[in-house]
Structures are given as structure tokens and as C-alpha cells.
Amino acid sequence: MKLMLEIETTRDRRLLHKIIGLMQHNPLDAVLNEPEVKSTFESMYENHIRSIDVMRERAKCVEGVIEFDISDKNLDGYNKFIPYYLFPDSVYCVGVSRSTSRAKVSVGTNPWTTKERKHNLARLCEQYGGGGHAVVAAISFKPEDLENARAAAREIAQKLRSA
């Protein structure tokens, strides 16, 4: 799981190739204990714990729909399952984040819910210029268009609750 986090999260292609090369010839414990791999994981894990704390502070769940706005935090690579961990009885999640390249509305379905899914999230997001799949979708805005992203997120959350 530690290596999976690092492989999926790193943007350092050199490190990624190094990990894959090490995995071809070494046991997983040896790969994890290689100094660069270990220090990178520790940094990523600290960020993961910080993102859980931020999400705990920012997210709320109303009528089965989680909403959060972390656009003022540097959490572009947060784990998308954190909201469902915090609100296991939720059905949907609508979040706003921002990076240097975009403001983003992420819309998802709790993969562990036993409640009926009543919305096609791709169709909802297409109404705002986004898209995706029936159970997970998103909308990208220009970074300076944050207020429109927030408005779209509020409207989508309301539509998800109204079913």
C-alpha cells in the first residue's frame, strides 16, 4: 500500500522508474527502505494526514451529500476517498479545489454506499461544461473562475439532494 501511494502520487518520473526498477530485483521491504523512496513516502504520508485534517474541518454532509471547498489549500493531489471515510453514510460528494492550472469541481458517488444511486454524474457535470462517468465526474474552470466553480458545486449538491 505504501508503494502504491508513492507510485500513484509521485510526479517525479525519475523516481517512478527507480521504484519500478527496484521492484524488479528486490523484495518490497528493500524497496520501501531505499532512502529516497522512504523519505518521499514519509513526506507524502504527512501530506495525506494533513489532508484528512483539512477535510475533517471543511467537509459537511447534508442529506447524504458531502460538500467541501479546499480551494485555498494546496491539496490538489488529495485522496478522493477521504470524504467517504469521514462520512461513510453519504451517497455523493461534491468538492471544489484549485491548482495553478484550474479550479475544479469533483463529483463522486460513495463506492461503499448501499443506497440507490439516482443520478448520472457525467450528465450533471456536462450541464456545466464538464463530464466523466455515471459515478464520478468533474468540471474544470480557469483558476481565476473560482466563484463560478463554487456556484456550480452548490447547484450540483442541491440537485443531488433533491432526488
Image (cartoon, rainbow, N blue to C red):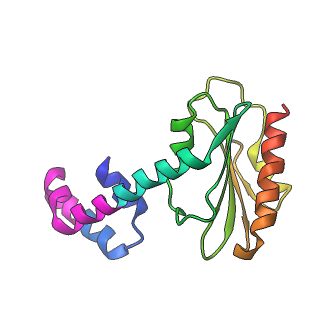
116 versus 28 height, above or below: above
59 versus 10 height, above or below: above
- In the rendered image, the residue lying farthest to the front is 57
Measured from the top left, where is residue 53 in percent x and y?
A: 48, 49
Judge whether residue 51 is colored magenta. Answer: no
Q: Nearer the viewer, residue 95 or 129?
A: 95
Measured from the top left, where is residue 5 in percent x and y?
A: 37, 54
Q: Which region shows up in magenta?
A: 21-43
Q: Is 6 left or right of 99, judged from the image as shown?
A: left
Q: Is residue 81 visible?
A: no
Residue at horizontal 36 percent and vertical 60 percent from the top? 44
Measured from the top left, where is residue 11 in percent x and y?
A: 42, 71
Residue at horizontal 78 percent and vertical 44 percent from the top? 157
Q: Quadrant of residue 89?
A: top right
Q: Nearer the viewer, residue 57 or 124?
A: 57
Q: Nearer the viewer, residue 126 or 162?
A: 162
Residue at horizontal 30 percent and vertical 51 percent from the top? 2
Residue at horizontal 84 percent and vertical 41 percent from the top? 159
Q: Is residue 143 visible?
A: yes
Quarter of the image for the C terminus: give it: top right
How many marks can you see?
0
Q: Quadrant of residue 21?
A: bottom left
Q: Quadrant of residue 65?
A: top right
Q: Is 150 left or right of 55, judged from the image as shown?
A: right
- Magenta: main secondary structure: helix
Measured from the top left, where is residue 153 in percent x and y?
A: 77, 53
Q: Nearer the viewer, residue 150 or 23?
A: 150
